[in-house]
Image (cartoon, coloured by chain):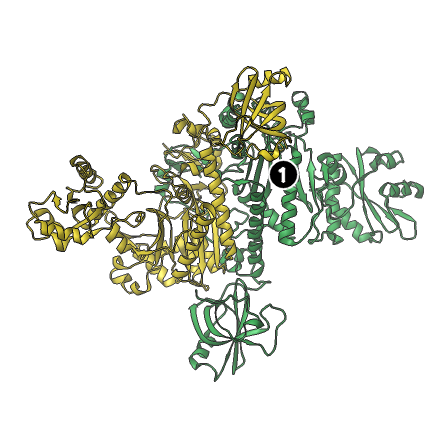
Chain colours: A green, B yellow
Amino acid sequence: MLRTNTCGELRMTHVSKTVVLSGWVQKIRDKGGMLWIDLRDRYGITQLILEEGQVDAALLTLARSLGREDVITAQGEVIERSSKNSNIPTGEIEIKVGQLHLLNKSKTPPFTIEDDTDGGDELRMKYRYLDIRRTPVRTALELRHRLSIETRKYLDGLNFLEVETPYLIKSTPEGARDFVVPSRMNPGEFYALPQSPQTFKQLLMVGGIDRYYQIVKCFRDEDLRADRQPEFTQIDCEMSFVTREDVLQTFEGLMVHLFNKVLDVQLATFPRMTYADAMTYYGCDKPDLRFDMKFVELNTVVKDKGFPVFDAAELVVGINAQGCSEYTRKQLDALTDFVKKPQLGATGLVYLKCNIDGTYKSSVDKFYSPEELQKWAEAFGAKAGDLILVLAGAPDKTRKALSELRLHLADEQGLKDPKVFKPLWVIDFPLLEWNEDEKRFFAMHHPFTSPLEDDVAYMNSDPGKVRANAYDMVINGVELGGGSVRIHNRALQKQMFSILGFTDEEAQNQFGFLMNAFEYGAPPHAGLAFGFDRMCAIFSGKDSIRDFIAFPKNNSGRDVMIDSPSVIDAKQLVELSLAVKK
Amino acid sequence: MLRTNTCGELRMTHVSKTVVLSGWVQKIRDKGGMLWIDLRDRYGITQLILEEGQVDAALLTLARSLGREDVITAQGEVIERSSKNSNIPTGEIEIKVGQLHLLNKSKTPPFTIEDDTDGGDELRMKYRYLDIRRTPVRTALELRHRLSIETRKYLDGLNFLEVETPYLIKSTPEGARDFVVPSRMNPGEFYALPQSPQTFKQLLMVGGIDRYYQIVKCFRDEDLRADRQPEFTQIDCEMSFVTREDVLQTFEGLMVHLFNKVLDVQLATFPRMTYADAMTYYGCDKPDLRFDMKFVELNTVVKDKGFPVFDAAELVVGINAQGCSEYTRKQLDALTDFVKKPQLGATGLVYLKCNIDGTYKSSVDKFYSPEELQKWAEAFGAKAGDLILVLAGAPDKTRKALSELRLHLADEQGLKDPKVFKPLWVIDFPLLEWNEDEKRFFAMHHPFTSPLEDDVAYMNSDPGKVRANAYDMVINGVELGGGSVRIHNRALQKQMFSILGFTDEEAQNQFGFLMNAFEYGAPPHAGLAFGFDRMCAIFSGKDSIRDFIAFPKNNSGRDVMIDSPSVIDAKQLVELSLAVKK
């Protein structure tokens, strides 16, 4: 080993020991007679000291020739520092260098290896191996490792088996777009990379592996939005002989375990909310419960008072921004502009200030008397000092806009505390979504999701009404994972495919292996999957997943470090029986 | 939960408890008044009993209608069995059924779900989800899980970080053939699936992640031999600031840990053998040390006695098959036929029987006196009762044939005990192999392997002589893993590519990202990778890896269960800017 200790572990108790450290030169201070080197490795920084007269002149010359990020090995004695640095754990000691070796020279790095670097995103991606040396990126990867270790520990303790499912599988047009892999040995045929191990984990249930998990890469060839990656990691789980309740308990338990072990945070029992309630009260299916501002519907309160906008609107709905009654004209105009953005498309924003002095001031007070405005305030349970914001229009669009306004206000008010974690389960999602373009239903989750037992009767008569036995885990407004009780009966699965517009032949051709398996004693089963990249970001209170991925791709799906994808040899194309057609 | 207990856990201590079990019907015995059901799940088999008169007639009717592999739930009381079955852990009790529900019907399975099934390989692959229900396959997957858990536990304990490297990387012609993935967003360009995360783990070392591991899928588009899979799993590891010794100690420690925790086997310190010695004494680079039969070279003993074959041969070399002097003419002929197979190509086999009575009998005793034959025996340290077998010819070919003969004899003699584990390190491999077809050197390991320091001087003058700082871990004649100290210096890496016939431009184009990284303070580093599928097989004393893979592909790279690879939609090809050219 080219070291006896790391750069993070030496303390006063080590004083007078002779040690060998290896690492990167973080900084050099040369005061003539004295020279200090900050030596850095994964574990920390330790100060080396060389004193003229006390060490070989050659050693000092070598030390003076060193630059940032050079790799060195130093041997020396641990001594107490005269001026201690309480900002770092090794700040009480330094190493009086006796020997010094240059292991490898470094060119000047294209950006500084500091917590706050001067490197832009593209530059950091291109030199990702240097970016990883920075503490924020390294600790992100360390957190990821810790989460994976603790996830496995918890699930292994509950008798879950990690089973590796294949990466070279079969392309199916339902769902997102597959990445495909041409087969050389079967000309004209392709494998697909899995979008998830869904069908394989279900086959494992049929195979009697009653508790399965896998931390596994998945692939989707989608047009990348910001913070989407073509390859991403799932914690994928499935259980047999269970009800929904068992799955929720088991994976709520996983999350409690992870928060406890990794962050020392104790989570309380997760509340549950139906999809319908989430939409009614928060306008979205992943409400952030770190703050209140629950929607209040005002139709019965505000209609027929002569305000044509509210009278014409199908829904009038608002939120109470507590303590915001002093918002200025300018602030209110900015909120109005926010909801009028084309993405939200509200036509206007009505406000009601519940002034500190007990009076009311509204943008529509020519239509509503103070007594009427007081009724609004009562509907919200608003107090003096609160600000009520109201939107009106078509229900779906209005709720969506109000949801965005709610989140925007929370940002403005600093209500999104990254150290506070508010989880919940959202349950009873719709089974199907109508697609107006294709004039057919799509599975909201996926085609293997079981309808709620009470709703099976509507499968043919009114498919849009059927609720799924599906659930999402949401923390702080982010969907961390989701799953469902699955169909385990061939007839019901066939019916589901038929509702989705598959002919029997198409269903058999694409998913025959699964439907056939259901005929050989498939047990009732249910499961879920977590987005692991996203989970890492949540645990760190970060919005972007990119720093939790060692080697991420950019928004064009390109790895700028290795310059991939790239053109391949003509010989490779011939072997694959393929031609490029631009 | 559709059960209170599993089918493997009930004992006498549970008697009189009411329990609910769920599982598959393994067997039904109907003796009229009494009916027994063997109920099976992942954890074992429990006997259910229904007695006429004691249970509802409807229940009995349902029970009588059940067939093999139906999925049921049964509630009942745990009672002591009158006739106990000591072959199974639950054999002392049975369940007096009170309620019974059919959860899912099964068609008659295409093969029996028994340890010794009547299903052939192809049928078992097609219905892999049924095959997985069989105990031998399930326990193989359980062993795999246990090995992965313990591997992570050990490495995590040593501060190794598991870091996920990307699956969509860049195609490089050096090495085996890549699987490629067309990029829709970059028409005419392709990603490649990794043959190993080699370059990425080296970049992690440059990035200061000084201890990395990953249990990771890798891909090779090779013409499949028996027991090769296009996708396979590696335990991939790398360390910085280490010497070869540190790597050998660390991963010898991993293996000691795994054998101890998983098999309760205590491994002794691993012997080390140079590649040169392995070839000299065992004729192969992965000697099986469960048995002796070390090669003895006889050139100095047998030459110039008038036997033209030996006199003409460059090498005369043999092994001592202890206690085999009574081999019959027929057995010896069979051994001769074995070495004369075209794959081995020996021209003949000379034997020397060291008879029990102290006399010698050889196939060439007209050329050698008893005294001379005794010298042979002495060279081998042979005792009365031993059989010496000798081959002669060109060294490489002769050693290879003798190695095969040695393994063949071990099989015949039952010396390959699957419960005995004899590990070793083979070290100091050649750096390069000359390829006569392409008239150039290839890297024996890969182009990133460092030469031994002593041999660097020969890099230009005599590349074939250079030994690599590379090592393989071998157990029972199987290469379990291998690795090397890596090059971490740009100039040496460039020289290596040049010896391999890369132009500077090709090297920069394909591996520029790595060589550039070496200029920014790359630390000395070394690592290795284990074949995880193979490791599972070794731990089970099995030859084939297939049962240790949940969903394997057949020898044409086809998944016969899901019928993949397959033709994709014309629309997909258009999106990918590709055309199939058969």
User: Which image quadrant for residue B32?
Assistant: top right
- The residue singled out by tag 1 in the image is A482
The N terminus of chain A, quarter of image: bottom left
Looking at the picture, tell me which residue is in the foreground, B214 or A65: B214
Looking at the picture, tell me which residue is in the foreground, B512 or B263: B263
Q: From this view, report whether residue B428 is shown above or below residue A63.
A: above
Residue A350 appears left or right of A401 = right
Callout 1, which amino acid?
A: Gly
Q: Residues within 10 Å of mark 1 (few under 14, many from 20)?
A: many
Q: Write the residue at 43% across / 52% down.
A: B256
Looking at the picture, tell me which residue is in the foreground, B373 or A496: B373
Q: Write the residue at 25% across / 59% down.
A: B465
The C terminus of chain A, quarter of image: top left
Q: Write the residue at 80% across / 50% down.
A: A332
Horizontal and vertical percent position of residue B192: 43, 44
Horizontal and vertical percent position of residue B151: 48, 49
User: Which image quadrant for residue A139?
Assistant: bottom right
Regarding residue B225, the answer to whether it shows in the image is: yes
Horizontal and vertical percent position of residue A297: 81, 37
